[in-house]
Image (tube, rainbow, N blue to C red):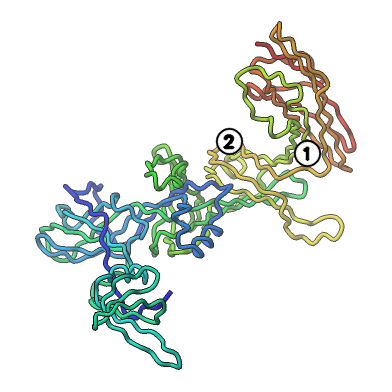
Amino acid sequence: MNPLTRAALVGIASLTIWSGRSSFAQVAPDVKPGVSLTVYSSADPAGFDPQAYARRASADPYYHQQQPMPGYGVVRDIREIDLAAGVSELRFTDVAAGIDPTTVAFHSFTDPAATVLEQSFEYDLVSGAKLLEKYVDKDVVVERSLGDGKTESIKGRLLSAAGGLILRDDAGAVRILNSYTAVTLADAADLITKPTLVWRVSSNQPGKQTIQTSYQTDGITWRADYSLVLSADDSRTDISSWVTLLNQSGATYKDATLKLVAGDVQRVQSQQQGGIGGREMAFAARADEDGGGFQQKSFFEYHLYTLGRSVTVGQNSTKQIELFEARKDVPVEKVYVYYGLPAESRYWIFSSPNLDRNLGTEMNKKVDTYVRFKNEERVGLGIPFPAGRVRVYKRDDAGVKADGNLEFIGEDVVQHTPRDEKILVRLGSAFDLVGERKQTNMTVDEARHGITESFEIKVRNRKETERATVIVKENLFRWTQWEIVDSSAKWTKQDSRTIHFDVDLKPGEERIVTYTVKYTW
């Protein structure tokens, strides 16, 4: 882009007329200036990576428009300002570029009767392309290189800035300039370098006043991350957690009080912001001995978390904050699940009984591995877990060439989980456990409205020394009315179409489970 030596641009948008006063709760008269920030997120922890989003947004200035950031913030800013008696203009700078001007609220603690009569939001900041567009039909001075260190200055009226520059010079000739080194623009007194709210304020008390402004802004979000380190026998884990806060809202929040809300907070979205709507939640918490960590409490139907220390959230930055203090030796159990039905058949629901003999006859041989623990106080937890990504590690501290390093063994996503609920984390597929599933019989009696289908399931444990209990999971997908008429092992019903068999295997052992299901309609 060609450099501009002197330039100015003023853009005014989104005029809002205020009627009446803002409604605020009573605040102590010694209220001090400062910023409070509450961050909400609708980010899918499985698909949203704050670091990757930041890199793409920095490389592509239009990325925000293509992929709106999944989250928003509520900003409350208390400042001291000077107001004249009667009606005067007040320019409130350093607001977020992502502000929604329709959400702005104003209150003066010094003069509660003060009222904002009109508001405008000036956001069309200094930009080469925008400046040139604004100066069409105005006089400019363009400098361009003639080679050998020589330059030429051309004075004229700017006719167009699309692509190159088109000028009518002082002699009346029209000149097309495809390249130039600098442009000087006159009348640059109203240069805007920061997003600014401009108010017409009516006040009865002239002089210094303490005011509070609050508003919503897009361009800020977060994601929670958890780390689990399993013990040598996989029976216990250490749990730590972090929140990654991504701020591209167009403002820095210096020494801010950070508040966060966990829960489903309804927010109506405009059509152009469709990528932002959905589940709104924020981070969970820890209570620090020095009061510096997150402290949580129930708040309406959500959970409210307040960081016990101030924090600076810089523009175009990512910041990690500890979610809660690490928990040690939390009991866990390792769970194996064999889901032999092919993935494409697991969730089918038919409007009539399915008579296709070949449906579901293919086989998945992998046995999945999970760790499971209960979020309860007696094991050092019992705290709300916001949705996030969980990474699991284990220390290489036994056997050949053990070096004591932590090795990554799998990751999963957990949804928002309240206290006293179980958390299940899928790690991957077990190398030494194998499953086989086959259909052994199927008969269809359309006259009597019945299907009878039989299966044989084999599970093998190829571990040398470790026993394994495998949950064999079966979906009864052909129709809603079913009955297990024969089974070689005890089964339990999980829901209207799912049953489980628990298969205990010694090292080197193979077990066979058979069952027959009858569907009727």
Q: x and y percent of residue 64 in the render?
A: 45, 56
Q: x and y percent of residue 375 in the render?
A: 59, 40
Residue that extends furthest to the front in the rendered view of this protein: 173
Amino acid type, mark 2: Glu
Q: Is residue 268 above or below residue 72?
A: above
Q: Residue at x 29, y 81 (%)?
A: 141
Quadrant in which the C terminus appears: top right
- Can the viewer see residue 23 in this picture? yes
Residue depth check, mark 1 versus mark 2: number of the one nearer the observer: 1
Q: Mark 1 points at which residue?
A: 366
Left or right: residue 301 compared with residue 406: left
The circle on residue 421 is 2
Which picture quadrant has residue 297? top left
Which picture quadrant has residue 481? top right
Left or right: residue 99 compared with residue 477: left
Label 2 sits on a secondary structure element that is loop
Amino acid type, mark 1: Lys
Which picture quadrant has residue 417? top right
Quadrant in which the N terminus appears: bottom left
Q: Which residue is drawn at 29% across and 61% down?
A: 32
Dot 1: few (<14), some (14–19), or many (≥20) neighbours within 10 Å? some
- Can the viewer see residue 319 in this picture? no
Q: Residue at x 32, y 71 (%)?
A: 132
Label 1 sits on a secondary structure element that is strand
Q: Which residue is drawn at 46% across and 64% down?
A: 316
Front-lying residue, 274 or 436 = 274
